[in-house]
Amino acid sequence: MERFKARLVIFGNLQVAGIDYTETFASVAKMTTMRVFLTVAAAKNWEVPQMDVHNAFLHGDLQEEVYLKLSPGFQVSVSGKVCKLKKSLYGLKQAPRCWFAKLSAALKGYEFQQSYSDYFLFCMNNGNIHLSVLVYVDDLIVTRNDSATILRFKAYLSVCFHMKDLGVLKYFLGVEIARSLDEFYLCQRKYALDIISEVGLLGAKPALVPMKQNHRLALSTSTLLADLESYRRLIG
Amino acid sequence: MQQPKEDHWHATLQVVRYLKQNPGQGILLSSKCDLRLHGWCDADWAGCLLTRRSLTGWIIFLGDSPISWKTKKQHTVSRLSAEAEYRSMAMTTCELKWLKGTLSSLNVLHTIPMLLHCDSQTTLHISHNPVFHDRTKHIEVDGHFVSDVIFSGILVPVLFPPRSNLQIFLPRHWENNNITL
């Protein structure tokens, strides 16, 4: 156990569309982009440090007017008072969107260009300095051709947000990343083992093929499954 | 999905047991890489037994590193196997063009043409021949799309021999994948 945490969270399910929130869409980076990013870093032999933002969703600025009932145990002299939110909180439907808007504004302020191919890829080409950042919610991976640039960039981000430097890239988007002199190796060993142990198949005989050929599963006439929940959890 | 049966559960468990065979298996992104895009595409004509729609399959390499792959059932029924191949070629071309864009954001300018490997001689002929006749009319959109990319010089289609190692990635070779890379 590293530490204890407490966090004030909003019941996002009580928010009313059009009043408490308008736009909530927030996408994430594609895995393919990550692989392209790492292949280029490997080919150019650039370092790939990783960073993480503390309490990312608390940084977002709220556009809508949202009120919060005081939490139980909070003493006020006059009853019937509520809080008006200025910044976003965890649990709000628009929190991820607010956070990404804030982060992309900060990156663009540092002369980054948002890629049209993947909106979560930010690149800066300034003469012979090249810096790229790939964002996944509150995780950032960076690559560059010059180490002074990266220090300046890290210093800039620390002014904007509360950053944590995670050092060399080891784990991103559920993928374990190992690097030797010549290559990156990407695998999902821990994730795969977690799935196998969850369904209790650690001792089972491995299968040679993932699926039988010429199956007709859509026409199956077998009995309905009783345990729907674990099936749905397993297929994601 | 709404009404899963026992059979579906067993099929899912088989996928998990397949994972168990080698959970630490992954991909290697090598530094000895010329950063050229190679696409390999194939189709399994009428591969879906219930709807007789075809499957598209592709894998794309950047240098020697695999970066993007997919198998997907096509939206329409193809009466010709060349038609299914052609649709798969068009989809792979889309992905290749997108990857080229992503690379240019990363300041890697892909000046040499990308290679698209395809195992159908017919499809290659159609893609090189801008004259369309009655038999290829119904795949006109995909046809024009691929031809345009080829004539603009950013893509070169190449024939790959049957039974090459890479075919194990492509849909119809799953059952007998005894080939090692």
Image: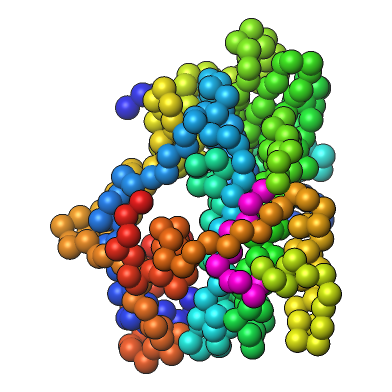
Instruction: Name the residue located 54 percent from the left edge and 84 percent from the top edge.
Output: B46
Q: Nearer the viewer, residue B136 or A32?
A: B136
Q: What is the quadrant of residue B103 in the picture?
A: top right
Q: Is B39 rendered above or below residue B104?
A: below
Give the residues in magenta.
B114-123
- Do we see residue A156 in this rendering? yes
Q: Is residue B116 magenta?
A: yes
Q: What is the quadrant of residue A117 in the picture?
A: top right
- Residue B157, given in percent of the width and then of the height, sits at 66, 59
Q: Is residue B93 magenta?
A: no
Q: Which quadrant: the N terminus of chain A?
A: top left
Count of marks overlaid on the render: 0
Instruction: Name the residue located 33 percent from the left edge and 89 percent from the top edge.
Output: A222
Q: Is B50 rendered above or below residue A194?
A: below
Instruction: Name the residue located 37 percent from the left edge and 92 percent from the top edge.
Output: A221
- Residue B95, given in percent of the width and then of the height, sits at 67, 55
- Residue A200, given in percent of the width and then of the height, sits at 22, 59
Q: Nearer the viewer, residue A226 or A197?
A: A197
Q: Nearer the viewer, residue A50 or B130?
A: B130
Relative to A222, B71 lies left or right: right
- Residue B101, given in percent of the width and then of the height, sits at 74, 43
Instruction: Name the residue located 82 percent from the left edge and 39 percent from the top edge.
Output: A63
Q: Is A217 rendered above or below residue B41?
A: below
- Do we see residue A118 in this rendering? no
Q: Nearer the viewer, residue A120 or A61?
A: A120
Relative to A104, B124 lies left or right: left
Relative to B57, A92 lies left or right: right
